[in-house]
Image (spheres, rainbow, N blue to C red):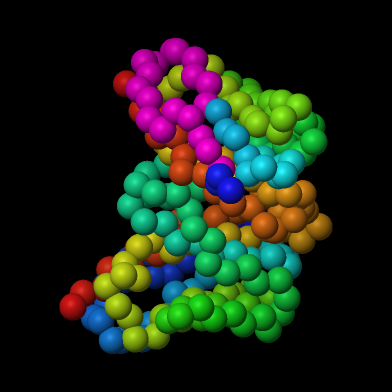
Amino acid sequence: DAGVTQSPTHLIKTRGQHVTLRCSPISGHKSVSWYQQVLGQGPQFIFQYYEKEERGRGNFPDRFSARQFPNYSSELNVNALLLGDSALYLCASSRTMDYGYTFGSGTRLTVV
Amino acid sequence: ELKVEQNPLFLSMQEGKNYTIYCNYSTTSDRLYWYRQDPGKSLESLFVLLSNGAVKQEGRLMASLDTKARLSTLHITAAVHDLSATYFCAVDEVGTNAGKSTFGDGTTLTVKP
């Protein structure tokens, strides 16, 4: 079975631009969580979705938004990019919202 | 606000030696995770600890949880070079569902021959 897949793997954006990151969960997984990992730090929780509904939001500004589609894939959107948004963005999926989350390989975003 | 602290943040070991990484957290929790991350890679789940006194072992790594002390340890036995990586602990607040974990800043382990 394929694992959690994220796209793109890398991208470079300019300050002020908008970006969309995509995540496809493991087949049968209905919950998706997003994390931001700045270099040298641990991941920080951004959003959680389950059955297409937002089930949690971390301490991030409104420039960050997300959604989950009927096939349980998810998008993370970031508007008005800042240099500080440069990070590895990780998606994790689980069958429900229990402890069995599997992480994808991440999208490395660089804002210049 | 839940805070998770790991120490040490950096650890350099000789092959064959033993060492322990500590993870302290600030509020009640009933789920604690240990992950491994290689440079430029994603997180690999190592252990999930779900109750006080839980102990899990895989190869040269052993993790334990003391919920009363709000402390978990990751013990490395007879380190080998392949264990070089960054290790994170993560905690879920009690009463919350999983998938919103708070992570520590990681312990970067370097095992030298």
Residue B91 is at least partly visible in this image:
yes
Q: Residue at x 33, y 80 (%)?
A: B79
Residue A33 appears in view: no
Is A68 displayed left or right of B47 in the figure?
right
Split into 4 quadrants, where in the image is the C terminus of chain B?
Answer: bottom left
B66 vs A107, nearest the viewer? A107
Task: Name the residue rendered at 55%, 55% in the picture.
Answer: B103
Residue span colored magenta: A4-21
Which of these two is toward me, B108 or B112?
B112
| Number of numbered discs on residues | 0
Q: Is residue A56 above or below residue B55?
A: above
- List the single residue furthest toward the left: B113
Residue drawn at the location 35% of the way across and 47% of the way down: B40
User: Would residue B46 be counted in the magenta stretch?
Assistant: no
**Percent from the top left, x then y, of residue B58?**
51, 78
Query: Measured along the vertical axis of the image, is residue A51 above or below residue B111?
Result: above
Examine the image and state in which quarter residue A28 appears: top right
| Residue B99 x/y as whole percent | 67, 49
- In this picture, is A107 found above or below B68? above
Q: Residue at 57% across / 69% down in the picture?
A: B47
Residue B61 % position (x, y): 46, 78
